Image: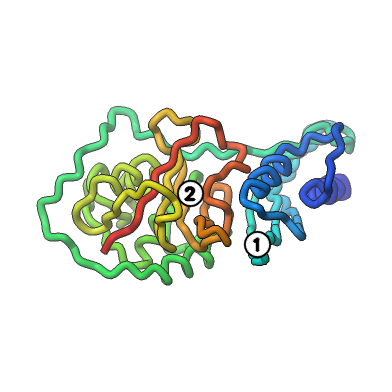
Amino acid sequence: MREILQELFEKRVQQFVANHRNSKDNFSKADRKLESLAKRSAEIVKVKAAGKVLENTSEDDFQTIKYNAHYQYLIKQKGNLYLEEEVEERVAKFYKETLIMDGEIKPIENGAQPVGYSEPFMADTFDRLSYQYNRLKAIQYAERWWNSYNPAYKKFENDCTNFISQCLHVAGAPMRGYPNRGTGWWMQNHNWSYSWAIANSLRLYLSKSTAGLRAKEVSSPDQLLLGDVICYDFEGDGRFNHNTIVTAKDANGMPLVNAHTYNSRMRYWAYEDSSAYTPNIKYRFYHILD
């Protein structure tokens, strides 16, 4: 089975660098990525892929393997080179050692609030909580933990917003609001605010907060600085379900981002190559204030 998976990896790698693709193969991931790169006058000059088996279960003649696929893309744009990475979770199924299915496990980021919860207006009744936001520390943290999990913090199954909150906190943003989960932004004593861990709640918090962690919404991604935040509403229904942090800029001055859930680093901000992308996608761009 491992040999079959390795053969699949090799075929996928060729799809990213070949000038044409076999019409019998449907590697839409490569199609999406190459199309996105072409819009930016960028190209992949080298790609590597490696797999890590997470689970291996058998029942009668059937075997199911859940695994991570780690991609590394060396991208060239206007004479500049940078390395983009992402980890995709997949599942392969075999019948009598014959591959019958291999597909992506699509993450569903938790953008929904608990039943009965309504987002409060973030009224501030205390001091401004001055702080200095250290953008370098935010980037260093995002680079250190983009594909792993800091044991000092709770890990969530849908971890993208928790990861962004960690980056912001390490960079100096002060927590506030404990122990009210619907107020402020905090993690403490094995508990946390909705804004710390839920994508839509963090987006609302950044748009309303006037104390502690604060942000200013800007109109376009090129206005963002390193350490700023992008929020994503993939379906365009008003409920945001993903967040990323800006860790670099490409040759056009556009953001490259790090994220969890689908762990990725130096990924182009628009997510057009993501399986979660839809034509209805909406973005919010937040510049962190101090």
Q: Is residue 273 left or right of residue 123?
A: right
Vertical side of 159 occupied by 252: above or below: below
Tag shown at residue 8: none
Which comes sooner in the sequence, label 1 or label 2?
Answer: 1
Q: Quadrant of the N terminus?
A: top right
Q: Which residue is mark 1?
A: 78
Amino acid bearing label 2 = Asp
The residue at the point 57 percent across, 52 percent down is: 268
Name the residue located 19 percent from the left edge and 56 percent from the top edge. Answer: 211
Residue appearing at x 28%, y 28% in the figure: 116
In the image, taking residue 253 as reference, residue 104 lies left or right, namely: right
| Residue 188 rendering spot, x and y as whole percentages | 30, 57
Q: Secondary structure at mark 1?
A: loop
Could you give the CA–CA distance between mark 1 and mark 2, rounded to whole angstroms?
34 Å
Q: Which residue is mark 2?
A: 159
Vertically, is 29 above or below 211? above
Q: What x and y, as percent, mark residue 287?
A: 35, 56
Eye-nearest disc, 1 or 2: 1
Q: Give residue 264's quadrant in the image.
A: bottom right
Q: Is residue 204 above or below residue 41?
A: above
Q: Quadrant of the C terminus?
A: bottom left
